[in-house]
Amino acid sequence: MEPTTNKAYALAGVDIHVADKIKKIIAQQARTTFRPEVIGSQFFGSMFQLQGYREPVLVSSTDGVGTKLRIASLLGKNDTVGMDIVNHCVNDIFCCGAEPLFFLDYIAMGKLVPEQVQAIISGIVQACREAGCSLIGGETAEMPGIYSHGDYDLVGFIVGVVEKKGILDGNSIARGDAILGLPSSGLHTNGYSLARIVFDIDANPSSLNRSYPELGRTLGEELLQVHRCYYPQLKPVLPMIKGIAHITGGGFAGNIPRILPEGIVAHIRKDSWDILPIFRLIQKEGDIKEEEMYQVFNMGIGITIICSPQQVAGIVSILPEAKVIGEIVEGKGKERIVID
């Protein structure tokens, strides 16, 4: 007898057959990212055999793309946010010196749209390949009544590994060390709630199609610029580095102090790099104070490196994009960072 529960479930807004088809497609794409250590991902849990390390320390992180998803949904371009979530997570664990091993995703929407899901997964797969990270599992949830039509949520979970003696914890950072910055590609995955208000995007989605001369592209294209992955670039210079800070939510003040020992302060010089045009535009259109801009956005610096002055030339020779944007100075009071 044909079960009736599936029909009733479909009437309730959840189509199991569509979900099964999507999961098969995802599984096929995910296999192209598998490292040799992947044992299996078809069970209730995915398995990864850790090998080749003396004192391995696992490093894990989870994050979301935030309201950048709203921009992707409005423009019908969903592959770049898939890349965003992988790159964001890879950068986070690399701040500890960890190599990315495997990644899991969570996609939830009111009604599963195969084309939309496939676009998201294609971006995740591409980013995982580029980082040498296995897409080992995930969850695709259909949740009618929770998400509006076209809207969805995307979350990533990553696990990496680092030798215990190679953990990058910032403990050796000292007064006189240099702070280098690598450029961002734009907002990355932070500050979109403010950007949406500044450009009145929710009420007037057509604003995303407006071209700005200073951007050289439409607003929508600018806001969907992919969050850069710094792992491949920074891996060769890792032995020269004392600390890494990923400039995400909270800007410089919310991230650099996390790796600083007590008694020292990060001094950032604002005139040491070119602020990206999108940030100038947001500040002007929203009449936002400069202080708040630096608290919300990365302002054109996606990641910072702290090293001894003697290592600066060597790092810059390998990473020409890197610029000295500040230095570590003696601390005074509770202040952990100065931006001037």
Image (spheres, grey):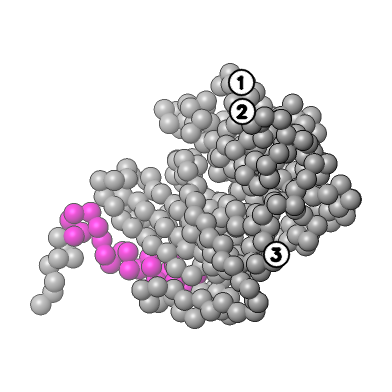
Q: Do the residues labelled 1 and 2 touch (CB within 8 Å)?
A: yes
Q: Is residue 248 visible?
A: yes
Outermost residue to the top? 287
Rounded to the nearest whole Å, what is the CA distance between mark 3 and mark 1? 40 Å
User: In terms of secondary structure, where does tag 3 sit?
Assistant: helix
Q: Position of residue 247 (x, y in %)?
A: 63, 43
Image side of residue 188 versus residue 267, left or right: left
Image side of residue 280 versus residue 39, left or right: right
Q: Nearer the viewer, residue 142 or 313?
A: 313
Q: Mark 2 belongs to which amino acid?
A: Met
Q: What stretch is highlighted in magenta?
A: 9-30
Q: Where is residue 177 in the image (x, y as percent from the top left)?
A: 81, 44
Q: Name the residue under label 1.
A: 289
Crowding at label 1, few (<14), some or many (≥20) Cα neighbours within 10 Å? few
Q: Where is residue 24 in the image (x, y as percent from the top left)?
A: 39, 71
Q: Mark 2 points at which residue?
A: 293
* Numbered badge on residue 166: 3
